[in-house]
Image (cartoon, helix red, strand yellow):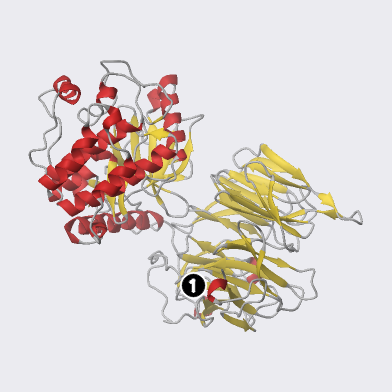
Amino acid sequence: MKPLSTGDPIRLGPYRLLGVLGEGGMGKVYLGQDRTGRPAAVKVLRPELAHDQHLAQRFVREAEMAKAVTSRGVARVLGAQTEGGRPWIATEFLAGPTLDEAVGAYGPMDGPTVRALADALSRTLYDIHTAGLIHRDLKPPNIVLTSSGPRIIDFGIARPQHGLTLTTTGQTPVTPGYGAPEQVLGRRVGPAADVFSLGAVLVYAASGRRAFDAAHVAAVQYEVVHGEPDLSQVPAELRSLITPCLAKDADLRPAPGQIAAAFSPPKGADRVWRSGPLAAGIKTRETDVQRATTMADGPRPVSRRRALTALAAGGTVLVAGGGAGAWWWLRDSSEAGTGTDGKGASDPFGIPPAVQAEEAEPLDPDKGKYIVGEAPKPLWGPLPVVAADTPAPLPVGDVVVIGAKAGGVAAFDMATGKQRWRAPAAVPSGRYLSLSDRLVALVDAKGTLRTYVPSTGAPKWTARADARTLLAEDGEAVYVATRDGRLRSVGRSDAKIRWTAPVTVNLRTKVHPLGIAAAGRLVLCTAEGDVLAVDTTDGSKVWDRPEQSDEVLRPAHQDGVVYLGGRTLAALDIGDGKERWSVPAGEDYLGNPQPWRSPTAYPGMLFAAHDNWPKRLDPRTGKDVWRMGSGNGPLRAQGSGVWTVDTDELSPQVSGLDLTTGYPRMVYREGEGSRWGLAAGGNRVFFHDSHSLTALPVF
């Protein structure tokens, strides 16, 4: 990887760019990092080509084709911009060598490894073809070897199975030696073309040599159409399996399912991706990428030159930002968290990686673990530890954070309920946020923004932000409402105040506003029911939606769409606020208005409550998928269910509803008081009433 140079963008959409992974005639591929710290490969069209209609259409097609495939064997598309500005596509960053790099570094693969490779690639081709697509450019550089197995990348010239050929006779549609004869001749191609390419890939993996080779391109293409493949260095036991894939007649080639059955790798062959020299190389790249993104997320005062480190055999380089910035550290013991180690850390920006929770085992009624429709036994609690002014619990890493009855904010072990640490100076009503699961952000009585390591309570960076309440966070900043009613952005990498902006909505009400930050927008919902979206780079207003509700809303976001409850359930483009669809609220049988409450979005799913009915809706249209059970509180998906709270009962009722049907599977009726909150994480549901915190199992 190369460092960014003059002319390279610093950011594309939600991705901060760290370096250049590669480039070609059409564009560049950058290592990017989103606001949660997740790395991505971001492919962008060159600026001088962005206005070429043909190339732009091809770029759009690549995004559409790649999104259509959901197989585990491909690099998943994370986002794309295909209109306006410079088109880009972001996919999973795969930390591992390509097949040609691996063969070059470690030599040809042995028989069991080739069988495992053939099995994995043929199954992925089956998924691609089932999605109605043809990859059309399967070759060693488009196959990445990861610790979870081979992954196919680059859908640059992929086409629907019914699509016409992309080129005319004589043009080169794919890498010479890997394209099928029908591709070379400019004829219509089908899924069998990918099978031919697979055969050529397997020859290279098994022998380190191309199946078709010659001194120049035209001669290679002639051999593909008229010659015989060179299998002289392929082990005899593999030749009979590979040869049918390279048949000149597409109708004589086996289907991907037949290939998987024929190669049938021996038991344990897939461990090659997790053990041995190749696995060690993969692990090195994973570690280096993690180091690159960690350094970029939390910079240290090192020179730029020293921060550029080679990423394994591919010559990839990682980039981390430098510069000491205006960092400060408050060491007063009254302001530090009382963690299990009692020490904190010397470097406020030396932030450890996120700790993953050990997931609880979901309960199975068929094994007698619980009775459908009945109350499950809590995993722990109720614990009488809850403060009077606490927001909902916050699962972070392996702890759950909540306002503490003893004062401040405390973190409890997800698995046992044991208190890990407490920050006595924190003000619970000022809320708490998870910063990429690596830090917990809190506000103290002086308006100081404080951060702590979730697992230990070790205090980290602080910022004098004059904050009244925390609103939202993204990969760049924490956003707060100040005590004088303005918006403020505090940088996560240096604790500097990035900007402070006045707003046209009231942020000084008794009920604190709520917000989300995503895709370059901070969306605020006030206690008076107004909605405002500002640009996260400077706090300037972008769009608003006055009087959306009579009460404070909690917005939800997924894939560039923000969902709002209130007088309507509305889906808006988060960038410009344009309405995609809306469903009006109704009235109950007495004529009382029944607003939409608690929209919650997950990939492909949208939940909201209306007239005390939890609903699952189609996020694309707002149409009901199911309406079942009872509840008017937030809905949180976990395990095979979605969980909600019904506060209209004499005591709060927590219900676990089947994700597919909405049928009530678990009902927990313990609790008291007028306050409640719900959260989920680690295959657990965390519920608090006016006094206690409880952890419930899921199904």
**Left or right placement of residue 279 versus residue 85 in this view:** left
Q: Is residue 413 above or below residue 490?
A: below
Q: Mark yes or no: residue 235 visible.
A: no
* Residue type at numbered disc 1: Glu
Q: Nearer the viewer, residue 275 or 688?
A: 275
Q: Quadrant of the C terminus?
A: bottom right
Q: Nearer the viewer, residue 626 or 82?
A: 626
Residue 646, image x and y in percent? 74, 67
Residue displayed at 77% across by 73% down: 674
Residue 69, image x and y in percent? 43, 41
Q: Mark yes or no: residue 110 visible.
A: yes
Residue extending farthest to the right is 590
| Image-quadrant location for residue 55 | top left
Element assignment for label 1: loop
Mark 1 = which residue? 361
Residue displayed at 39% across by 39% down: 128
